[in-house]
Amino acid sequence: MSNTKSWGNYPKVAASRVTISETERLKALLNEVDDVISYGNGRSYGDSALNDNVVCIKPKNYFLNFDEEKGLLHIQAGALLSDILEFSVPRGWFLKVSPGTKLITVGGAIASDIHGKNHHVEGCFSESVAMLSLLLPSGEIVSCSNTENVDLFRATCGGMGLTGVIVDAKIYLKKIRSRYIDQKTIKTKNLKETFEAFEKYKDQPYSVAWIDCLAKKGRMGRSLLMVGDFSDDGQLDFVPKKKLNIPFYFPSFVLNTLSVKLFNAFYYGKVKAGVSEQRVDFDTFFYPLDSINNWNRIYGKNGFTQYQFILPKKNSFEGLEEILKTIANSGKGSFLSVLKLYGKENENYLSFPIEGYSLALDFKIEKGLFPLLDQLDEIVINKGGRIYLAKDARVSKATFEKGYPRIEVFRKLRRKYNMHEKFNSIQSKRLGI
Amino acid sequence: MKSSTQYNQNALESKNSYILIIGAKSDIAKAVARKYAEEGFNLYLAARNASALDEFASDIKIRLGCKVACLELDILDYTSHQIFYDNLKEKPLGVISAVGYLGDQEKAENDFAETSKQIATNFTGIVSFFNIIAADFEERKSGFICGISSVAGDRGRKSNFIYGAAKAALSTYLSGLRNRLYESGVHVITVKPGFVATKMTEGLDLPKKLTGTPQQVANDIYKAQKNKKNVVYTIWIWRWIMLAIRYIPEWQFKKMSI
């Protein structure tokens, strides 16, 4: 038994962990334990990879093949995206889809069907997956893709590890000519301007906005929209970077309304008005927080949660206005608030993205937080939106079900393959998945 | 000026050379293989059921761009060793043995087959193999031989003295081999790992501060080989722990449980 945590440090679970590196041992394990969930690098925020029994898949991290003609990489599920980039960037290849951290496993990327700053162009991670191998409760390993075992593929991508253990996958990479990004930062004064800027820069492959969620009235929704694309300069060499570390948990009072307000004002204020241009390394552009080890410790020992929701485009403006107002009035600040316009929804049963705007907010766990989030849930559901499972540790079953209308198809498939008797997380039990 | 060009030329050649690792399925062997591949060497990975190494080999080939061949070798099939070595087209620059079998002490005490297996795997088989390597390296007047022994060979303890005795014999063998090959310029390294977190020790409750990782062991081995160290303890603190243990008088030691 050891304390197993997710990135939010909430909840904490005493789990018995089994580390596997060989497929044969993994199969044997399935006969020994019931009620188990795969655990990658512990970067999902809530309780989706936590249970009394977890299988650590990280040691299974070998590169099996790389087809340089097609940019097709065959890789085991425990490999980190950072392993891939270290290998691929000097050779002129990049992930087609990458989230805001490269410190997640390939298996985790598939199970959460993660997305990135280019969702409006490239879709989710699953759209770069040519094939994946899945270990079923029966001990059989099946290969799934858009053309083979399609139902298993659609359930497994975004399926939060609840369909089996993802063993390996073939993923397409994209060609790049530089490790640098030509970036534009657009400073907006309010939510309306922010929305207009997103629309105006829609043809940029990468876009994301940091939003000041404590700004009120006329300044509500003021943002820094960052858009960009890979440069063309042929510079691909590896540049090692220094890392900072947060050596201990900050006392929980460090982050309060005042300090977050100050940070937000400073962060917003230091950028020039209008449009400015920068050239930044891909690490700075995609993974700013990866350069600080253990950054989650700034939220203190009690941990934090990330509240991420998405609203259909037609209701986004109204919905966001209402939500930002509610947050600003509550005084609970989130100093990492990220807004993004998404592209079309895919066909996976539980993938998060739909076409519309998503907002992600980090809150430290404290008294009064969960009632506020319940209030936000209500607005999200009323506007036809949903909550992201990879970030969640507290949403109710009813809220979840309203947001994910295809859940019944997923449940049926779980029963068909006996997955519900073998693969469960604390989250899946809470939500009756 | 000329000599420095000569030196660089040699360095370049050695980087494309092969390193032969036997017992290549162990976690330490894999870490050593990765270390040498990172340093630009090609690899022969030899083990029983070598096909189990295919995925590992492809990982190293793809990520580090070196040549890797997985070869079938049964350390207990002594007569096959010469044939195995003769079949290597390009002879290796160095050979590292990570062959080891911890076994079960209690079983060994009551079952000679188990005792015999521990001795043969940890000692006899390696000697058979290294004799062949030594003869070739001596003639070529180059190369290195590295044997992974164990701190368990430094003093016999009731918990694992069959294994320990075999490792002690291996350490003694390596010491003699070093002495023999010194004049030919062939270097011999004895590696004595203390606790290492591997498959072999999974489930044992090892003290964290005294337990190394396979990567640490691999780095120590590479450094020791490069700097021509003779006997290396890994992690370093074990040199001092074993020094202390060796100094306990026998009349006292026999009463102890450590």
Image (cartoon, rainbow, N blue to C red):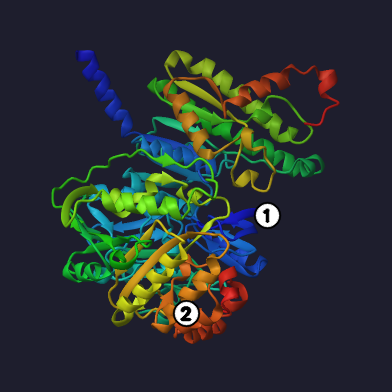
Q: Amino acid at mark 2?
A: Glu
Q: Nearer the viewer, residue A45 or A314?
A: A314
Instruction: Answer with left or right where residue B191 lies relative to residue A340.
Output: right
Find residue A196 and report its horizontal and vertical position in percent: 20, 70
Q: Name the amino acid type tagged 1.
A: Met
The x and y percentages for residue A360 are 39, 65
Reading the image, the residue beneath label 2 is A378
The residue most toward the front is A217
**Which one is nearer the viewer's eye here, B204 or A23?**
B204
Residue topped by disc 1: A1
Across and down, in percent, residue A217 comes to 32, 67
> Which quarter of the rendering shows the C terminus of chain B?
top right
SS at circle 1: loop
SS under mark 2: helix
Q: Which residue occupies the foreground of this view, B229 or A369?
A: A369
- Quarter of the image with the N terminus of chain B is top left
Identified at 64% across, 41% down, the residue is: B101
Q: Is residue A2 left or right of residue A196?
A: right
Residue B125 figure quarter: top right
Compared with B209, A319 (above or below) is below
Instruction: Kindly identify the residue that appears in the image at 48 percent across and 36 percent down.
Output: B82
| Number of numbered tags placed on the structure image | 2
Dot 2 and dot 1 within a common chain: yes
Are dots 2 and 1 in contact, CB under 8 Å? no
Question: For residue A413, which numbered disc appears in the image?
Answer: none
Q: Position of residue A384 (x, y in %)?
A: 39, 83
Residue B122: image quadrant is top right
| Chain letter, disc 1 residue | A
- Which numbered disc flags the more N-terminal residue, 2 or 1? 1
The answer for which chain carries disc 2 is A
Mark nearer the viewer, 2 or 1: 2
